[in-house]
Amino acid sequence: DGGITQSPKYLFRKEGQNVTLSCEQNLNHDAMYWYRQDPGQGLRLIYYSQIVNDFQKGDIAEGYSVSREKKESFPLTVTSAQKNPTAFYLCASGFPTGQGARKLFFGSGTQLSVL
Amino acid sequence: AQSVAQPEDQVNVAEGNPLTVKCTYSVSGNPYLFWYVQYPNRGLQFLLKYITGDNLVKGSYGFEAEFNKSQTSFHLKKPSALVSDSALYFCAVRGPSGNTPLVFGKGTRLSVIA
């Protein structure tokens, strides 16, 4: 988990509330990613960013938003439109390796629960 | 579209026995294949990857994986399992395009019994 910091470790959301998950990396990586982990479903990609001020939707972007104003930071907002937000959220970052395959480094995750 | 399948939700093995965690993939072009491990309430840790070259890839903690192009498989193996190997294992794949995100399998829970 070294180099990528996710906070908080646990987060609770009330009905209709937006919450923001923090992800910071000091690895000088270009790319950053947000995944959602649900039991038995593996990791599903929410959003990713290859460079500052640019990001793309993943497979399950609805109800989420992101920003990439700095290379080191990629916060994820879970909006009130996300009706089933309870999950373990993982942030990752990466850099080109070898012939271009990007090895990912993961943070230690944030467990989001609904009150 | 790229995808990866891990056909076993759970693998149980006795300590000291060899272990195999299965993974098959689908991707256009030559694949980049990865294995990651997750311990409880933690992020994923990189184990090994295949990009090109030797079909047998060696990684961290004594793990290795064999790339089989004809069977589109990338099974994770270890000759002698340890109780400390008990964890959730994820296979991941991406296509040859440099900007394509990794696609992960659903994970296989490995339990090594003493």
Image: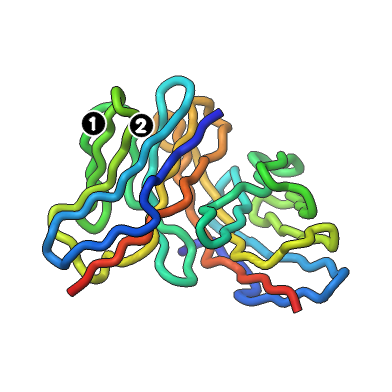
Q: Is residue A85 left or right of residue B14?
A: right
Q: For marks 2 and 1, give the one nearer the viewer.
A: 1
Question: Of A11 and A96, which appears nearest the observer?
Answer: A11
Tags 2 and 1 on a common chain: yes
Q: Where is residue A46 drawn, in percent x and y? A: 67, 49
Residue B11 is situated, as x and y percent measured from the top left of the image, at: 30, 58
Q: Is mark 1 on a helix, strand or loop?
A: loop
Which residue corresponds to mark 1?
Answer: B55
Residue B79 falls left or right of residue B2 = left
Snapshot quadrant of residue B40: bottom left
Q: State the separation of the CA atoms marked 2 and 1.
A: 9 Å
Q: Which amino acid does label 1 sit on?
A: Asn
**Residue furthest top as drawn:** B29
Query: SS at mark 2?
Result: loop
Q: Tell me where residue B2 appears, x and y as whole percent.
A: 52, 31
**Residue drawn at point x = 81 percent, y = 76 percent:** A14
Q: How many marks?
A: 2
| Residue B4 picture quarter | top left
The answer to whether residue A86 is above or below residue A50 is below
